[in-house]
Image (cartoon, grey):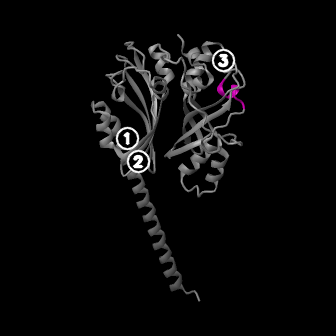
Amino acid sequence: MLTRRGILRGTAGAGLALAGGARFAAAQGSQQASQRERNKAAVLGFKEAQKLGKSVKEVEAEFMTSNYRRHRGGMFHLAANAQGQGFPGAGDFLRGAFPDRVDKPVEIIAEGDMVGFLFKITGTHKGNLFGIPATGKTIDVYEIGIFRLIDGKIAEAWFMADEVALLRQIGATLPARKDGKRIVPPVTGEGEDANAVVKRLEGGPLATVEDRNKLLVVRSKGSAPPKDARTADFRQRRAGFQNLREFGERRGAPTQTVTEAMPERSDPIDGLLAEGDKVWMRFKLAAVHSKPLYSLPPTGRRVEAPEIGIAQIVDGKWKDAWYFGDELGLLLQLGYADEVLKP
């Protein structure tokens, strides 16, 4: 039988349980925030150490785990094209090619054991760069890194730089190889179907704003993208293949976008990071080039190019978006790298 005293005891017990749960949630949130900040500091420290003139070995000993793995270098295609050609080395962290190199932070985000870091490489081309002799020209290009950390040390990293912008800024194309070939990245077929990711996220608790923001962003790549998902003042600050877009504008074909040229494209998802109102989504453009692309004739080739989208979500709607894709890899697969890069 319920009595007033029993009700009061039950109420007090529930209050204690709720208070205990709130304290646990607060402590857990504080711990997660602490991990995020520690991991961000490690990545920023890794970048700062490069400016101090330390060697790759010294930097890796200080900031990386003993079994650190770099899945992809920033200048991935330039390095691949130069492999085995006997070109002079570019030096640790490309300081042989850009002795005054400085990496300027643009944005950093962390979730769990992962960190995303967007920065700009600036410097003067004073030495050989993967077979390209010094030009004396300056560069200012984006690079992005995705890191996984263990106990405050970097265990894995993946980088992608704007190699097309770099080559255009120094007025160069890929150097000729002895075999006369270009090294073309493979089509891997990797990545998780966007609809599968949507279903998985919908099946979760969606307890945090970050969880809900991730779902909103991934839905944009699914078969049923939401309508009216953008704020009235939504702005796309950068196209994924920005250099190609500018090429198309110069050629008088600005509407022949990647999506128009590859209408059956799919964008499998490689990973998500969310913190506050920001979501980073790593995915791949996977498609067949069946129509003209910024005046470049269709090739019928199957292509795949990694891309990263950075979204700001405000009150459940997209406020702005910024994209960054592997343009040089895409152009190599299409066979149009020299056409786009020529002066």
Query: Where residue 149 is drawn, which disc sits there?
Result: 2
**Measured Cα–Cα span from mark 3 to mark 1:** 40 Å
Residue type pointed to by label 1: Val
Do callouts 3 and 2 mark residues in contact (Cβ within 8 Å)? no
Q: Which quadrant holds residue 185?
A: top right
Of the image marks 1 and 2, the number of the one nearer the N terminus: 1
Q: Which residue is mark 1?
A: 43
Q: Residue 287's spot in the image, x, y percent?
A: 67, 32
- In percent of the image, x 36 and y 52: which residue is there? 151
SS of the residue at dot 1? helix
Is residue 261 rendered magenta in the image? yes
Residue 194 percent location from the top left of the image: 64, 44
The x, y position of residue 165, in whole percent, is 49, 21
| Above-or-below relation of 65 to 121 | below
Tell me if mark 2 has few (under 14), some (14-19) or many (20+) residues whose alpha carbon lies within 10 angstroms of its own. many
Image point (62%, 45%), residue name: 192
Query: Looking at the image, which is closer to me, 86 or 296?
Result: 86
